[in-house]
Amino acid sequence: MTLALDSGRRVSAHKVILASRSPVFEKMFATQMSEALSSNVALPDAEDHSVDIFLQFLYGGGVEDSVLENGNLICALLQLAHRFQVLDLMTICEDRMAGSLNSENVCQRLRFSDLYQMDVLKKNAISYLTRGDVLPAVKETNGFKTLSADLLAEILLEQSGCGKGRKRACVWREFDDNADWGRLSVAQLKRACLERTLSSHGRKSELIQRLKSHSASKETAPSNPTSQAGTPVPMQIVVAPAAA
């Protein structure tokens, strides 16, 4: 099997090794996809060095600390690990990225955590952003401007004390428990899940079912008296201390 890189370099690897470490390669070879028939896999977006390290890991060589300390390299390695679903390598990258956050890389890594559904990295990144005077400084960076509305909502909820693990109660919500969930967009459904500290991952139907189940489990839940069922209103967040 040959991996064709964007630089024009061609790297040889054994199918049996690739298939044993990656379910993506395994399926590729088992279903006789075009790559398997041609014995050629194109990696147009991968850098030479990151591919070398990726293959070294697949062959059982591990990952050196110098690689994990290189911000750009670890991101490139994570992208390869995610593309080919090498979960143990993803975990290694996530743990190191979560433990080496700073004001320059936190926004990029928060986006990665959302894109690749890495809960540990996301939790650490949001916690870092809402600590002390970090957020005002990070708001001035270009990275902050690239964050999605959903990620900004999560940061807001955490900062106002309504995030997961906080011993404070969010009294008012953007969407009340009587909302017509089917009328809302995916972005709105995700915000509604976050307000209730529910997972915001999944398809629209899954988000709706999650919210319906949550509403059904609460016989009496605080609602926004100024909103009509299913109609979002401007966000009102009132933070109150939880009962002792």
Image: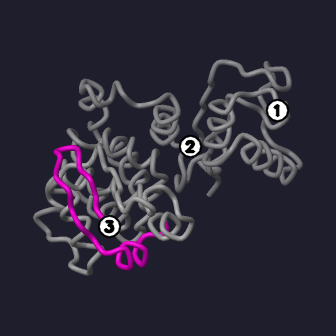
Please state which of the two labelled residues, at mark 3 or mark 1, is closer to the viewer. Answer: 3
- Magenta segment range? 1-23
Disc 1 and disc 2: Cα gap in Å?
25 Å
Disc 3 is placed on an element classified as loop
Q: Is residue 198 left or right of residue 85?
A: right
- Could you tell me residue 123's position as x and y percent? 43, 53
* Comparing labels 1 and 2, the label whose residue is closer to the camera: 1
Q: Mark 2 — residue?
A: 162
Residue 114, given in percent of the width and then of the height, sits at 46, 45
| Label 3 sits on residue | 1
Alpha-carbon span between mark 2 and mark 3: 51 Å
Q: Earlier in the sequence, mark 2 or mark 3?
A: 3
The three-letter code of the residue at mark 1 reads Gly
Viewer-proximal residue among 103 and 86: 86
Q: For residue 182, which numbered disc appears in the image? A: 1
Q: How is the image coloured?
A: one colour
Q: Is residue 243 above or below residue 225?
A: below
Helix, strand or loop under label 1: helix
**Who is closer to the viewer here, 128 or 54?**
54
